[in-house]
Amino acid sequence: MAKQRIVVKIGSSSLTNKQGGLDLLKLNEHTSAIAALKKLNYEVILISSGAVSAGFYDLGYPSRPVTVAGKQAAAAVGQGLLIQAYTDAFRKYGMVAAQLLLTKDVFTNEVQYSNVYATLTELLKRDIIPIINENDTVAIDELTFGDNDMLSALVSGLVHADFLIMLTDINGLYNKNPKKDPTAIKYHKLDVLTDEILNQTKHESGSKFGTGGMKSKLLAANMALSLGVRVFVGSGSGENKLIDIMHEKGDGTYIGNQNSNSFHKHKQWIAFHSNISGQIFVDKGAFEALMYQGKSLLPAGIDEIKGTFVCGDVVEIVYGNSVIAKGQVNYSSEDLTKLKGESSKLLMEQTDSKKPEVIHRDKLVISMKEAYNYE
């Protein structure tokens, strides 16, 4: 049987002491649980916060900094200390750890996205434990994930993980805040995350040292589900906590089911991370060919072009007033404006190209809403 691939996300609240500093006892407990999981032949990728917590004392701060500059300086000092702590802890079990620091633009850049995938694949093949964190020292608002919850979801999708475990200081999802309302009811299992559940959950972090509250975890879980990854949100203690979670005995909420659909790597990039450069409006024949017959987009079915794009850019495909798909084009907007509605033969002759498709099926993602509504 193939190894199951598990992503474990550990937040600041699960790594810090009462003063906000890094708690090595907690870190060592997490590593013992990961080591136990790996000994059962699971592949594990760790998404870990904690760089700011590890570094602010050495900077001379009496408590965790609140300014951006202070946090980034603390992260610069703390990231090395954090990875060293993990390296030392895993070495006790004869295991090797590796560090990857990511920013959001890695996911929107197709080449970098593929490189991260290749690196993680090679590390896992070599039985190394990748430890991933956001690159807090250089990240700006436009390049941040918001918190490591969303980062863990995106990484889970990228590596086609079987399961995402988000460890936190609250033992699962409730219909109300259990710390404020004793009548709160816990959700033990959710096949999907409805708008009602997403809207009833607030943004507040359970810990004063964390950046992501339960709302953040649900948004991340929703992203993971759309990428084909099931999720657990909850708490645990001891060496066997991750094993218990994988055996459906975890103290938390299980989200998703075995029927989740996933995209392969390139389509995942197109669907969730690529920047849109323009739009291609299609006629009814092209719409039906794309939606229901599994066809590529040909020039004959194109009515209109909007925007400026070149070969390799990602565009939206529009029918009527609805975006029905995204895809990576083989031709520029200039060429398609001139040759829309024409045959593939004429398009290839006029552009000196050997590709009959404007967008090949392998580089096209049908919107899930449209596809699922078709019977």
Image (spheres, grey):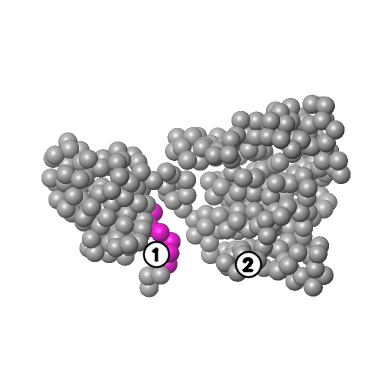
CB contact under 8 Å: marks 2 and 1: no
* Amino acid at circle 1: Ala
Q: Residues within 10 Å of mark 1 (few under 14, many from 20)?
A: few
Q: Which residue is mark 2?
A: 197
Picture coordinates of residue 302, whole percent (x, y)? 22, 54
* Magenta stretch encompasses residue 368: yes
Residue displayed at 82% across by 40% down: 20
> Which region is colored magenta?
365-372
Residue displayed at 54% across by 49% down: 157
Does the magenta stretch mainly form a helix, a strand or a loop? helix
The label on residue 371 is 1
Residue 88 lies in quadrant: top right
Q: Kindly report the distance in space between the C-alpha atoms of the residues bearing marks 2 and 1.
A: 24 Å
Q: From what the image shows, is residue 318 above or below residue 114?
A: below
Q: Is residue 161 left or right of residue 369?
A: right
* Magenta stretch encompasses residue 235: no
* Amino acid at circle 2: Ile
Frontmost of labels 2 and 1 is 2
Q: Is residue 165 left or right of residue 312?
A: right
